[in-house]
Image (tube, coloured by chain):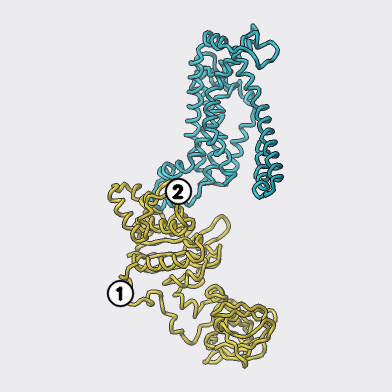
Chain colours: A cyan, B yellow
Amino acid sequence: MTLLRSNTPAQAMPSANASAGAGRGAASMKMLLITVLGWTVALVIFFPILWMILTGFKTEAAAIADPSFIFSPTLESYEAVQARSGYARFALNSVAVAFGSTFLALLIAIPSAYSMAFLPTRRTKGTLLWMLSTKMLPPVGVLVPIYLIFRDVGLLDTRTGLIIIYTLMNLPIVVWMLYTFFKDMPKDILEAGRMDGASTLQEVFFLLLPLTLPGIASTGLLSVILSWNEAFWSLNLTSSKAAPLTAYIASFSSPEGLFWAKLSAASTMAIAPILILGWMTQKQMVRGLTFGAVK
Amino acid sequence: MATLQLNNITKRFGDTSVLKGIDLDVNDQEFVVFVGPSGCGKSTLMRIIAGLESATDGDIVIDAQRMNEVGPADRGLAMVFQSYALYPHMTVEGNMGFSMRLAGVPKEERRAKVLEAAKVLQLEPLLDRKPKALSGGQRQRVAIGRAIVRNPSIFLFDEPLSNLDAALRVQMRIELARLHDKLNATMIYVTHDQIEAMTMADKIVVLHDGVVEQVGSPMALYHHPANRFVAGFIGSPKMNFFNVDLLSVSPEGVYIRLPGGGECTVPADGHTLEQDATLELGVRPEHLVLDEAGALSGQIEVLERLGGQTSLYVRMGELLVTLMADGDVGYRVHETVRFSFAPERAHLFDSDGRALASLTQHPLAGLTRQDNRTPGAAEAPV
């Protein structure tokens, strides 16, 4: 997508200074082609999700019949899913775990990123790389020890347990992102604050946080999304009490076989909140993720 | 009262020594300019005075109180940054009042003080604007206003004019000089621009490679540079240097042979010179005069007509000599010109680059910017 979009300014140029109608026609032809191509790529990427949403509105019979866009929509699957298990309970767990872990991760990451960005030592770069390297470890490699620890300290199937795991899981990314945002902040402004009599805490609350808020917001958003979508740990460390929506989806693939329509309905309900959140905040997300790059 | 003493300030970053033992006295109400090429340590020195950086060694004394361990805000200083460093999310009023907000000053009092400073700087109509809606010059004034509001004993300016265009720079230079007269505050100003240093300073501190090369009034530095570096750095265009042969030393001065064979006596104290000492002669472009009978000659390589003045770049063997002549001299490129200089305008430097003391004192050498003022001028409206 980016590749396609980067072509547009170059395409726009001839159309801007073309006086002849023919030149303008060729340019708008190209624009049209690019638009069609863009939509095609977007549709290909989005198609599985679209299909899932459509399947959710089909009957079980229609779901396994020949693929078709034409069918009479029904809420049958949604009703069945609702009747079987409480969506709200799982959703509440997801919200609590995603936002709780994000809050905790930011709480730890902001001071860490501050010290790395503004008071770097010889080991700062190494620490950052080491933190990131923990993300390269396959989670299944530490499943057994973590499971045993959680069992012994009574964190199995608790929201607290999941919040702790998710915080640790996202912390490297959150610290890295905040570090790059803080790095972009002109040091002079913080020093001016110090000359004006600001303590470190005042510096952070009056200057650093307000000025890097877009970055912090997009970091938080990413952390929420990553936690929301996480399935490995939630499936292995929870069973009923603290199970989030990922566990809810998984519960529809039962030993009796797959019920595609119900599974789709459940999945749609599980991703809907985060889809809407992402859609509403896409501007901030893009701005945050490209913050340093385009400045 | 606000005085500052620096005693043997050193600063090392790892193995690199940035400041190598700086001693300096700044008197009350003095306008002191640190000047030097980039990398000379002038900004580091200012940051150490401000408390944003700690000295590796030495003492910072403000008003007879050692300040090394005192935080930046408690030293009674205010600093204007090169980038202005305004708080982008606050209005002009918010920027100027931030220090008072942190100190818990009530809102009414804050506003009154901000208004007072805004009046001095003509910022009143801009108080509700955010920095991004201001021009460069206005931002600069807000940065100065933020400093004034703190009512500091010493103002620090870190290359405050370098982000402005040439015309605005001249205007702000004049405004800053006026502000100094009006506030009667001690000011320390860092710049790499020797014109800013010459025009604003009571006292110039020339720094080079972490060492103070010379401290003195602008006129003292211009007329009696202590060494070759200061001679070359102060004055624009740069001073010309010639290798000359020492012939003899007498109470009247040093008798030398010029390149091209001419001879003259420069009134300088040469009694410490060895018999075969190598000497360098320094003459400023504005002190070289076109002279049919002159001892020096060369071919004009470049000619720059500025209207009122003409700069001639004259080739003398390896040397390209700069010469400032009258605006309407009739020479052309490739013509050969002869020129001379008044010996009392010339400077001699020994092989270590140290200037030989001049036997005549320039009448303006003791003059400071303060002396230019007529009594009562300070009360004139700004």
Q: In the picture shown, does residue A213 fall above or below B123?
A: above
Q: Is residue B337 left or right of residue A109?
A: right
- Answer whether residue A20 is visible to the viewer in this image: yes
Q: How many marks?
A: 2
Image quadrant containing the N terminus of chain A:
top right
Q: Residue at x 58, y 24 (%)?
A: A230
Label 1 marks a residue whose chain is B
- Quarter of the figure with residue B38: bottom right
Helix, strand or loop at disc 2? loop
Q: Which residue is mark 1?
A: B376
Label 2 marks a residue whose chain is B
- Quarter of the figure with residue B325: bottom right
Q: Which residue is mark 2?
A: B88
Q: In the picture shown, does residue A108 fall above or below A268?
A: below
Q: In x, y percent, where is residue B147?
A: 38, 57
Q: In x, y percent, where is residue B333?
A: 67, 81
Q: Residues within 10 Å of mark 1 (few under 14, many from 20)?
A: few
- Mark 1: amino acid: Gly
Q: In x, y percent, where is residue B318?
A: 69, 79
- Mark 2: amino acid: Pro
Q: Is residue B155 left or right of residue B250?
A: left
